Image: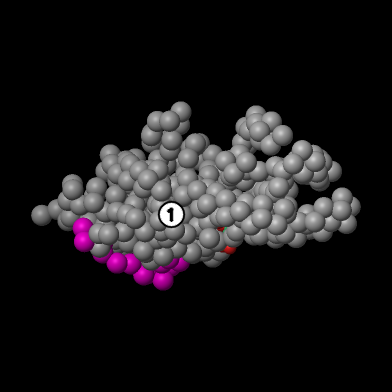
Amino acid sequence: MSQKQSIAVLCSGGDGPGMNAALRSVVRSAFKVGVDVYGVYKGYEGLLERSIVPLDLASVGNIIQRGGTFIYTSRSPRFMEPVHRAKAAAYLKELGVMGLVVIGGNGSFNGANLLNKEHGIAVACIPGTIDNDIQGTEFTIGFDTATNTAVEAIDKIRDTATSHERTFLVEVMGRSAGGIAITVAITTGAEAVIFPDRSVDLAKVATAVTRGVARGKKSSIIIVAEGEKEGLGHDYQKVLKEKYQLDTRLCILGHIQRGGNPSARDRFLGSIMGNMAVKALLDGQTAVATVVRQGQFIIAPLSECLNKRNDFDNGLLELLNTLAL
Ligand code: F6P
């Protein structure tokens, strides 16, 4: 009698709201066609520690609305070493799984790609990161919720800024991609946005604020993209004060953006992509990613999704400057 088929699933890298929806979809889609699922705890670290749990229908009940990932996640520097990837691959082969679903960002996709290239493990990757910076997909799970969380927080900051007639710098996550920064800048009516990875013109930022104040604005918000180093907002605050006599308060939103109940959009992405990833593995695909292109969900070769994307439309900056007048 042939052995029952099984797959494994893990979340890796920074968590993002909607990962639980994707896990639920992976488990239930597999279950529907009689395939067992192992959840790997703490991402690639769990493969190295042989830390897994069989997931059944009930284990993914009541999680679609929860932020985070119920099987935990981690960043695993040692997984970047071939010797550890070999150990992980050997474990997956021992388990007899037909493939691995990886939910994560760019680094996680690269780890999956190496597992496939070096050891022939079939992998199906689901983009899950608040940064929305994976090449080859227009959206990643978590981005929508993270931007909404930031917008909610900034609306609150606007209230106190207005009461005190103040200017705030608000630093948001998103590494170098800047997608969160430009989106929240436009949708909170910010006066300016600073991208450390592009040319930073603080004179222009100061002018935007003073011009607004001169025409009667009671508060100003300057969004700071975190870039590759968290906390740069402190440096900009100092320069704005010393060079342009602009007094500001600084708020670094930080990890609040990674938590919270996923938006409908992120639950939807997770539900669709989890199902697609399972189908891809059962179809015999060996190195793929679930992506959104021109609004359509498709399965793409993983090789098209290995780089970072940090190329948001320059027209959005122009739009911000127009609307912030
Ligand atoms: O990649 C997602 C992200 O939240 C980035 O926006 C942020 O720079 C980083 O992770 C923070 O990572 P950690 O939680 O490991 O400090």
Left-right relation of 279 to 267: left
Q: Quadrant of ligand 1?
A: bottom right
Q: Percent x, y for residue 222?
A: 70, 48
The quadrant in which the N terminus is found is: bottom left
Q: Could one spot residue 207 in this view of the protein?
A: yes
Give the side of residue 62 with respect to residue 224, left or right.
Answer: left
- Rendered position, 72 above or below 149: below
In this rendering, is residue 116 above or below 44? above
Asked where in the image residue 4 lies, by quadrant, the reply is: bottom left
Q: Is mark 1 within 8 Å of ligand 1?
A: no
Q: Is residue 62 left or right of residue 260?
A: left
Q: Position of residue 211 (x, y in %)?
A: 79, 39
Residue 252, position as x, y percentages in the image: 64, 59
Q: Disc 1 designates what residue? A: 17
Question: Is 51 one of the magenta-colored residues?
Answer: yes
Question: What residue do we see at 32% from left, 61% from top?
Answer: 39
The stretch drawn in magenta includes residue 54: yes
Q: In the rendering, at what x and y percent does residue 30 appear?
A: 24, 50
Residue drawn at 50 percent across, 40 percent down: 305
- Closest to the observer, 114 or 274: 274
Quadrant showing the C terminus? top right
Q: Is residue 87 visible?
A: no
Instruction: Out of 215 and 250, give the one closest to the viewer.
Output: 215
Kind of residue at disc 1: Pro
Q: Is residue 260 left or right of residue 212?
A: left
| Depth order, front residue of 40/241 | 241
- Please, what secondary structure does the residue beneath circle 1 have? loop
Q: Eyeballing the image, is 159 above or below 132?
A: below
Which image quarter: residue 311? top right
Say which residue appears at 61% left-offset and 53% top-offset: 159
Q: Of residues 187 and 58, which is closer to you in this image?
A: 187
Q: Which residues are magenta?
A: 42-58
